[in-house]
Image: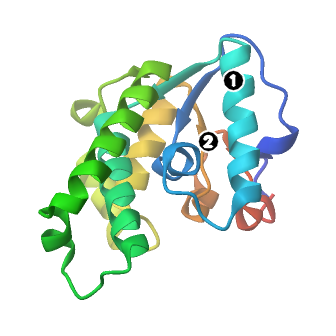
């Protein structure tokens, strides 16, 4: 039983807490909307409460890159022009307005966040790769866990892959919540 995972919808946010949002949370907040409106509402409320109590939200270039790339691919999937490759879609004039929208979203996100270094120089790549070889872990998720662990951040995520991480996690993902 893992006690470091809490339901984000029941969490009471307090001043000066430190949070790190995974890319999937930024997509719920500032990405193409999905049929999962209830999740958008849950994470939007948490984001608003964090901002209201002056909680601190951190981001690094890894998560920002994941957000940008996934946002663009979601737009590609929603455009329903699967006859074109993603690269062709990205190079089209149609994509220009999408890129502008993503750019605006990134500026909004970074306005709410403190940008941090990913800390690659302090992470043991050998240890991460040993864990990676054993399976069940995503390299980027490992880096995010290390960032949170090394900085005392609470991770806000909807990614079920974090269930075995020993960091504080807030989520609305029932798979993560069922593991507690």
Q: Could you tell me if residue 170 is visible in this image?
A: yes
In-image side of 104 versus 25 (left or right): left
The residue under the point 69% across, 39% down is 44
Residue annotated with mark 2: 156
Secondary element type, mark 1: helix
Relative height, residue 64 to residue 48 (above, below): below
Q: Is residue 140 left or right of residue 180?
A: left
Q: Quadrant of residue 59?
A: top left
- One can see residue 134 in this view: no
Q: Quadrant where the N terminus lies?
A: bottom right
Q: CA distance from mark 2 to mark 1?
A: 11 Å
Q: Nearer the viewer, residue 24 or 86?
A: 86
Above or below for 81 versus 8: below
Q: Residue furthest bottom?
A: 83
Residue 161 relative to residue 11: left or right: left
Q: Which residue is mark 1?
A: 50
**Above or below: residue 178 compared with residue 115:** below
Q: Nearer the viewer, residue 167 or 72?
A: 72
Give whichever of discs 2 and 1 has the lower sequence position: 1
* Circle 2: element type: strand
Label disc, if present, on residue 137 of the rendered structure: none
Q: x%, y% of residue 180? A: 81, 57
Q: Residue at x 48, y 24 (%)?
A: 151
Image location of residue 76, percent across then percent down = 33, 69
Residue drawn where x is 68% and y is 51% of the image: 40
The colour scheme is rainbow
Q: Position of residue 12 (x, y in %)?
A: 85, 27
Q: Closer to the camera: disc 2 or disc 1?
A: 1
Whole-percent x, y for residue 26 in the image: 51, 44
Q: Quadrant of residue 93?
A: bottom left
């Amino acid at each position: 039983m893992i006690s470091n995972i809490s339901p984000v919808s029941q969490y009471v946010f307090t001043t000066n807490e430190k949070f790190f949002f995974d890319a999937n949370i930024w997509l719920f907040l500032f990405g193409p909307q999905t049929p999962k409106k209830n999740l958008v509402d849950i994470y939007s409320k948490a984001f608003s409460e964090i901002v209201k109590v002056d909680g601190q939200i951190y981001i690094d270039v890894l998560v920002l890159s994941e957000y940008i790339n996934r946002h663009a691919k979601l737009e590609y999937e929603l455009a329903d022009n699967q006859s074109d490759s993603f690269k062709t879609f990205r190079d089209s004039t149609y994509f220009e307005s999408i890129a502008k929208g993503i750019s605006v979203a990134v500026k909004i996100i970074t306005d709410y966040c403190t940008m941090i270094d990913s800390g690659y120089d302090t992470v043991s790549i050998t240890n991460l790769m040993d864990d990676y070889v054993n399976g069940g872990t995503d390299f980027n998720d490992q880096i995010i866990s290390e960032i949170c662990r090394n900085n005392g951040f609470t991770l806000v995520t909807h990614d079920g892959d974090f269930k075995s991480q020993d960091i504080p996690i807030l989520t609305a993902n029932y798979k993560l919540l069922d593991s507690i």
